[in-house]
Amino acid sequence: MSALFGLIRKEVYHILRDRRTLVVIIAMPVLQVILFGYAIRTDVDHVRLAIVDPAPDPKTLALRQRFEAARVFQTVAVLPNSRELEPLFQRGIAQGAVLFEPGFGERLGRGVPANVLIVGDASEPNTGSIVQAYATAVVQGYEQELSRGRSVRIVPTIRMRFNPTRESSNLFVPGLMAFVLTIVSSLMTAISLTREKETGTLEALLVSPLRPWQIIVGKVAPYIGVGFVSVLGVIAEARLVFDVPLRGSLSLLLIEGLLFILVSLALGILISARTSSQRVAMMGALIGTMLPTMLLSGFIFPLESMPLPLRAISVVVPARWFVLVARSIMLKGTGLAYLWRPTLVLVAMAAVLLTASTRAFHARLEG
Amino acid sequence: MRRILFLARAEVLHVVRDRATLAQVLIVPIVQLLVLSNAATFQIVNTPTYVVDLDRSPASRGLINRFAASGHFRVVGESASLEPANDALLRGDVTMVLAIPADFESSLVRNGTAPLQLSVNAEKGSAAGIVQSYASAIVAAYAAELDATRAVRASSEPGGRATIAVQTRSWYNPALNYRDYMVPGILVALVTLIGTLLTAQNIAREKELGTLEQLNVTPITRGQFIAAKLLPFWVLGLIDLSIGLLVGAVVFSIPIRGSLLLLFGAATIYLVVALAIGLWISTLVETQQQAMFVTFFVMNIYLLMSGLFTPIDSMAPWVQVVSQANPVRHFVTISRAVLVKGAGLDDVLKPLLTLVGFAVVTLTLAVRQYSKRTA
């Protein structure tokens, strides 16, 4: 047993002495919480609008006034014709444009439909459609005013459940936990085990009286510690800086976290057992664990929108289930009653992967 | 000059002979393009929606049909009470609940207005805001449609009312295809990864193996060494960009509206920045593991703040300012402007000049930082 502790101590020294890696592991999650909180947003606001009004009249001026008054719009240019419009879009100066036809007010006065063309820069499709919807709403509001409220209106009340202000930090913290745990558990473990292989020091460990499982435990235990510290840091920062709620039970969250760590560690060991150089291990960890955690867990991008093959793959991505569980616990305060299914999936994954990874490691030792 | 070429040739042989690196250079870009362009989107399609229709009238049916027909929403469940809807929301099975009150149609006929309740699961990704915008747009369009049928009736009466005919156009991407937006951005990520990660890793590897020491005792100068190291990766980056463009054009048929010459011109400048950052990282680290971590750390921040995944315009104001110091942002802007919008040289002159500035500054800093150390 003391041999095991000796190995753990050695590994801890490795981690503590490699300052640069340590700084990255500690600093990355902290910075990422801030980044995700402030940078990863999709709200469309302060839309830069160009107006093309060939023959200004009281009616077009009144409608333009309404665009100026709408908080979401910001008029950046008023042009007499549409010829100069394209460069504004190409340079990204304007995101949307409203084009009046000549004689707009006169037609409106006669009761003939007056034409307005609304253009959105749809190179980013969401922004394009949302800009169009906003602008259409402004025109419709004006029309309603003209017809003195005689037109049909449906007034939707929109409730944002579980995260009323749609704080993006609330959304990302659970996903970020999964991400940090993956980096520390899978990537670091895979690299650290392969490095011992590459430098030949694993051979030395193998001829020592340590049992194979002791070598594995000794190598990975310190990383569990680092992972936990990182995660606690993320949770603390989320609470202190962004006021992210923790509505459910902390102990359940930590237990699920431990389950996820086991899965990730098993993956890391599996990768290291199958590779012989650090570079291949990095590639394997990157493609096998990091990218799926980032992309296919529903952490940033909605899974529903993805094509079927990717959705099918996402089912075997452990992070998908952990993100689901962590979000539910933190934001909805749900308990095991709702979460037994994803929890069971994680347990099954842990069982399968741990068996497979110890087997793979054994096989290599004998071979 | 001959020394540079010799060393560069050695470097090329290394890359070609090492399967891992070759895979990194050739396969990763293709995988990245295929996966990222499908996975990294905020495209709103088939959002699972639960409908609680307490009215069961032609008007409420009509509204539900508009939602289903939009392609953005998919009705996965329906019931006559709110309870199962809330349950589905809590379980996370649905993203939105559309609740239509019992007096929906009658109140529309009587007062011309009707209430409606939309509950969006805001916990589900940052797409919730977009889901809400699309839902509101559908509701508004439906109201306008109902209004038009009333207006027909009204205009048969004397003194018909004023109408404004609104037409909308989606420039540059009329089919609202998200891939057309993502692929030009992903190309940038690809070039960045090759340039920075490979450079940092490569030099760190020579350090680890001790072969850097050997090079340091040769008469080769610092400038020659750096030039020889960077040259192959500079070419590789351009090759990768070509592969990526080819895949994008053939598989995804993304638009190429502007001049490719301009795009490649910008890429050659941008690659200098990416390589210089890689070189700079390699001077900071001792091992490949560190190189990988530091690169990953830097790349992460750069890519997330570049507007590649989420529009710069949506970011917090101070982030928008800070992101000006992000070279990736400027190349993403150029790539999208040239490919999607067909922008010419004078349209992208500002980001292009910014990149030139970055190239000069980062390369100078990296070269100064790099020393043929003896200790």
Image: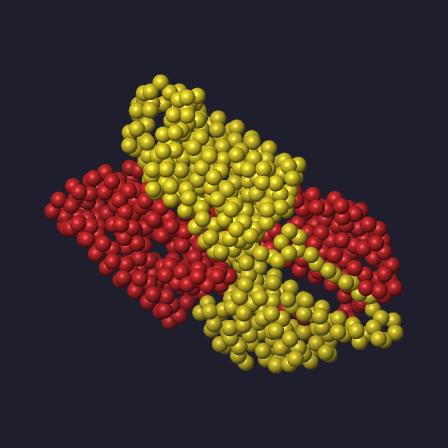
Residue drawn 69% across the image and 70% down it:
B143
Q: Which color mode does the image show?
A: by chain
Colour that chain B carries in the picture: yellow
The quarter of the displayed image where residue B220 is located: top left
Going by the picture, which residue comes out furthest to the left? A209
Measured from the top left, where is residue A111 in percent x and y?
85, 66
Q: Is residue A172 left or right of residue A289?
A: right
Total count of labels: 0
The quarter of the displayed image where residue B278 is located: top left
Going by the picture, which residue comes out furthest to the top? B219
B345 or B246, which is in the foreground? B246
Up the image or down, B235 lies above or below B165; here it is above
B3 or A37, which is in the foreground? B3
Up the image or down, B145 lies above or below B322; here it is below
Q: Is residue B244 left or right of residue A232?
A: right
Up the image or down, A367 lies above or below B116; here it is above
